[in-house]
Amino acid sequence: MSNPFDLSGKVALVTGGAQGIGAAISAKLATAGASVICADFAPMADESIAAMEAATKAGGSKYWYLKANLTEKGAPQAVIDEAVKLAGQVDILGNVAGTIRRAPFLEHSEEDFDFVMKINLYAPMYLSQAFCRHVVGRNGTGKIINICSMLSYQGGILVPGYTASKHGIAGITKLIANEMGSKGINCNGIAPGYIATANTAPIRADAVRNQAILDRIPAGRWGAPDDIAGAAVFLASSASDYVNGAIVNVDGGWQAR
């Protein structure tokens, strides 16, 4: 009986793949057999390199690092073009790169709002567009995985740009699913709960807010990047071929509370 989670022969492009959730997803996809292009503005951390070397050995796959500044004009198309040059084709797109700027609503600057929107919404939009053109152009099939958020549903506080971008990426996920599903491309989202990454370090450092968050999570702990990676493998694999336009909450039960 074939393994529906086997990604052998597939090529994945993961933005933000050098660290955090992106690195965890990259390693898990590689372990499942996919060759992975880790695209990021930052260099790969030593632990990410070690994880990818172990993952590609286990999965019989390969990986590449691709430096990419997604705020630059034309960058999404250039990243897809370079990924195709490196690996021959791209079958899976993980739009994982993200950023956050915190300030009260009355003080949130136009510069911060625009920067967050460029990374969290505009880049996934245009990367997905370029990816879909590539897949349709070669009469292939593809999977897009967008990173949404609990703030795709809620307003949050102190993060106007982040909230707007994550509501937006949820909508774009459904739009792409509607238009591209008949062309062999599935688009789904993962909505992480509170995950221990660099983006959430200021919250975890606030003892009062940290405890309030833990008190609401049924699992009783912050999530780890690896908690997101399993869902990504599912959405990248043939096991999810009839899943389209969905947003999968990986939040320890936060949204159910």
Image (spheres, helix red, strand yellow):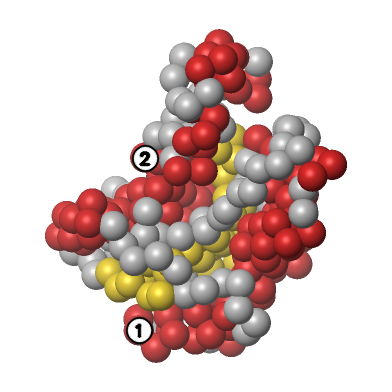
Residue assigned mark 1 = 86
Task: Label 2: state its secondary structure.
Answer: helix
Position of the C terminus, as image quadrant, is top right
Against 109, residue 257 (above or below) is: above
Residue at 49% in and 86% down: 81
Q: Is residue 82 visible?
A: yes
Q: Amino acid at mark 1?
A: Leu
Task: Label 1: state its secondary structure.
Answer: helix
Between residue 110 and residue 6, name the one nearer to us. Answer: 110
Point out which mark residue 226 bears.
2
Against 98, residue 129 (above or below) is: below
Residue at 42% in and 80% down: 83
Point out which mark residue 160 bears.
none
Specify the farthest residue to the front.
107
Q: Residues within 10 Å of mark 2 (few under 14, many from 20)?
A: some
Identify the image quadrant of residue 127. bottom right
